Image: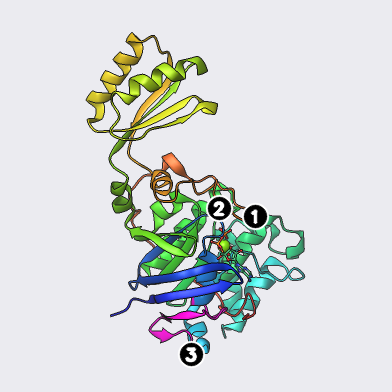
Amino acid sequence: MPGAIYAEGLVKTFGDVRALDGVDLDVPEGTVLGMLGPNGAGKTTAVRVLTTLLRPDRGKAEVAGIDVLAHPDKVRRSIGLSGQFAAVDEYLTGRENLTMVGQLYQMSGRDAKRRAAELLERFHLNDAADRTAKTYSGGMRRRLDLAAALVVSPPVMFMDEPTTGLDPRNRQALWDVIQELVAGGTTLLLTTQYLEEADRLAHDICVVDHGKVIARGTSDQLKARTGGERVEVVVHAPEHLTVADEVLRGFAKGEGTVEPHIRKLTIPVAGGAKLLAEVIRELDVRGVEIDDIGLRRPTLDDVFIALTGHTAESADGDGAGGGDGGGGAAGTERSGTTGDGRPASAAGHRKEGVR
Ligand SMILES: Nc1ncnc2c1ncn2[C@@H]1O[C@H](COP(=O)(O)OP(=O)(O)OP(=O)(O)O)[C@@H](O)[C@H]1O
Ligand SMILES: [Mg+2]
């Protein structure tokens, strides 16, 4: 049985650009799919097709078991969307924006107000709640938009780069909300360039580049594809890079990388901590002074580089890009989902017109 989000052979071209070039997706109910890809990969286009805002040239899609092309109105009633660009009413206050969404969804005035207050608190917008949104900073708008997407809870939710532009505290707040949503049974498709975020939140990850899904699997499966552990060395002085590189090649189980500007060398290895000790000894014998050395598992960054030949952040593209990439800090644990699963979603039709 197809999952709560299902797509087969989606193609969408804009002139010469094949924004989607045969995308298949299948997201089981109650799970999170993290869609990773560099700027211009086709993430937003995929979200727009799945949320009925854009018709594909070819292919089919179902959301919550409903055919997206045949019954867009029904699909819209079953989904929530937080788009890449915040869509809030500038002339209303934060509180009014949220209350209005609740009322659009037929909540009573009192319920809408209560929900608005909860969300304002949750996204640390209390102090600004009664100011018009046009006085908000970029990050505050983003948070208000996300809060608006969470006023009611639909079974299927789409979030396009939800944490871009959020500070760490608010990113964490959103992650908590997402985990509650999923614990409550919501199916979520989340696009992100923050590899750490996909690592943290997604049950499955698909990597998109040039309109194609180029890899999919769990975070661990994707990491396994790039091989095992890595040794990272930061040498004290740039002139030590060449010798260190020579030493490391003797231990490497594949191509390594050198980042001269930060005096860092990375090699794939097999052998764990024992090998690390040998590397340190050998570097010492050869007179290489090191500032830092460590053993780490591959990150999604490594996966990304292996798959696309570039990092998520350095990809060519037309978008604003940026982002911290999350990189090395990411653990692989899947945080336990707790909470009442109550908060949720938004209006598929709230954001953009169908083109
Ligand atoms: N309405 C449009 N008209 C013309 N080209 C478009 C349109 N929408 C998207 N594209 C092109 O399709 C490609 C995919 O764009 P899309 O917005 O889906 O990328 P993305 O993965 O969301 O990127 P980002 O990370 O920058 O948000 C890009 O080359 C983009 O320029
Ligand atoms: Mg996008």
Label 3 CB-ligand 1 distance < 8 A: no
Q: Nearer the viewer, residue 346 or 325?
A: 325
Q: Which residue corresponds to mark 1?
A: 139
Q: Which residues are magenta?
A: 50-69
| Label 2, residues with CA under 10 Å away: few <14, some 14-19, many ≥20 | some
Distance from disc 2 to disc 3, alpha carbons, whole Å, reads 36 Å
Q: Which residue corresponds to mark 2?
A: 170
Residue 132 lies in quadrant: bottom right
- Disc 2 secondary structure class: helix
| Label 3, residues with CA under 10 Å away: few <14, some 14-19, many ≥20 | few
Q: Which residue corresponds to mark 3?
A: 71
In this rendering, which labeled residue sits more in front, label 3 or label 1? Answer: 3
Q: Residue at x 47, y 80 (%)?
A: 58
Closer to the chain start, of discs 2 and 3, is: 3
Q: Relative to residue 164, is residue 117 depicted above or below?
A: below
In this rendering, which labeled residue sits more in front, label 2 or label 1? Answer: 1
Residue 355 lies in quadrant: bottom right
